[in-house]
Image (cartoon, grey):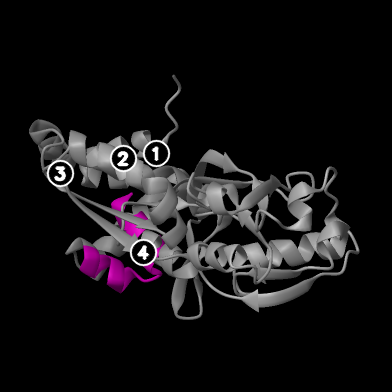
Amino acid sequence: MRAFCQTARLGSVSRAAEALFLSQPAVTLQLQALERETGVRLLERSGRRLVMTAEGEALYELARPLVEGIDGLDGAFRERLRGLDAGELNVAAGSSTILYLLPRIIEAFRTAHPKVRLSLHNVTGASGLDLLRADGVDLAVGSMLDVPGDLDYTPMYQFEPMLITPPDHPLAQKAQLRLDDLSPYGLILPPQRLTTYRMVDLVFHQNRVPYTVALEVGGWEVIKQYVAMGLGISIVTAICLTDADRQRLAARSLAEYFPSRSYGVVVRKGKYLSPQARAFSELVRPQVS
């Protein structure tokens, strides 16, 4: 199974042999024996690579977590003997998650496990997913709209979409807020490549409501400051609104028009999580009183 998983992952018998510290003939014999036992073809050649058949993909999905669990057994056993008082944990998260969601969780984790070396990697999008797939981090915390098939996403928080304006803005006092009420006012939005901008554009177009972008700028803190200065209005996720913000901004829910954003834990499918990673994941989960 180990020879099969490595060959399927690397696409080459020679590379699998190097990873397993075995000879190529030894790996080939193991693959042939596995196909005889299962009675199906598991791998086939596509150009210079070996790729999985449909039967191979089915077996790989079952075998990979078992192989990784066995390979990680020694380290996990030693970590269990030491408890959670040592080791390290690598977590990927975007700026907004690090700034607004994680401070309380980091504080609780550091209090409970002061000897664990915790590293936060400030990465988002494809870079964060690549780091997760390469095992550069144990897990990621953030928001996902589309979840790739090789990852598991567990949403734990929901945050409403909010319109923010200066306190004396006409929309702050309007009794019934409709989407077309926003049309006369310039929006301050994150750059077009980001999910928030794309979502705003999609909703306005679906409702056939025109809108104007007054300013594109990255970072919720900058957007909130510019809105407070009267340079425009914005649509943000409630995760970024603090008690201090509500003193200088008016905030109104737009949940009738825009979907809420979920935040949670992302892991590579089949990955064995260390005790430290499991403990951190539990802290991310909202505490029910």
**Which residue ends up furthest to the front in the rendered image?**
168
Q: Residue at x 62, y 76 (%)?
A: 216
Q: Which residue is mark 3?
A: 75
Query: Which circle's residue, 2 or 4, is located before the other in the chain?
Result: 4
Q: Amino acid at mark 2?
A: Phe
Could you tell me if residue 94 is visible in this image? Answer: no
Residue 150 to residue 202: above or below: above
Query: Which circle's residue, 3 or 2, is located before the other in the chain?
Result: 3
Q: Amino acid at mark 3?
A: Gly
Q: CA distance from mark 2 to mark 1?
A: 6 Å
Closer to viewer: mark 3 or mark 1? 1
Q: CA distance from mark 2 to mark 4?
A: 17 Å
Q: CA distance from mark 3 to mark 1?
A: 24 Å
Magenta stretch bounds:
1-19
At which x and y percent is residue 56?
49, 54
* SS under mark 3: helix
Q: Determine whether, in the image, residue 240 is placed left or right of residue 161.
A: left
Query: For the residue carrying disc 3, how many other residues have a C-alpha within 10 Å: few (<14), some (14-19), or many (20+)?
Result: few
Q: Are marks 3 and 2 in contact (CB under 8 Å)?
A: no
Query: For the residue carrying disc 2, how many other residues have a C-alpha within 10 Å: few (<14), some (14-19), or many (20+)?
Result: many
Query: Which circle's residue, 3 or 4, is located before the other in the chain?
Result: 3
Q: CA distance from mark 1 to mark 4?
A: 17 Å
Instruction: Name the main secondary structure of what is drawn in magenta.
Output: helix
Q: Residue at x 53, y 39 (%)?
A: 157
Q: Which residue is mark 4?
A: 122
* SS under mark 2: helix
Q: Which mark is residue 284?
A: 1
**Which residue ends up furthest to the top in the rendered image?**
289
Q: Are marks 2 and 1 in contact (CB under 8 Å)?
A: yes
Query: Which circle's residue, 1 or 4, is located before the other in the chain?
Result: 4
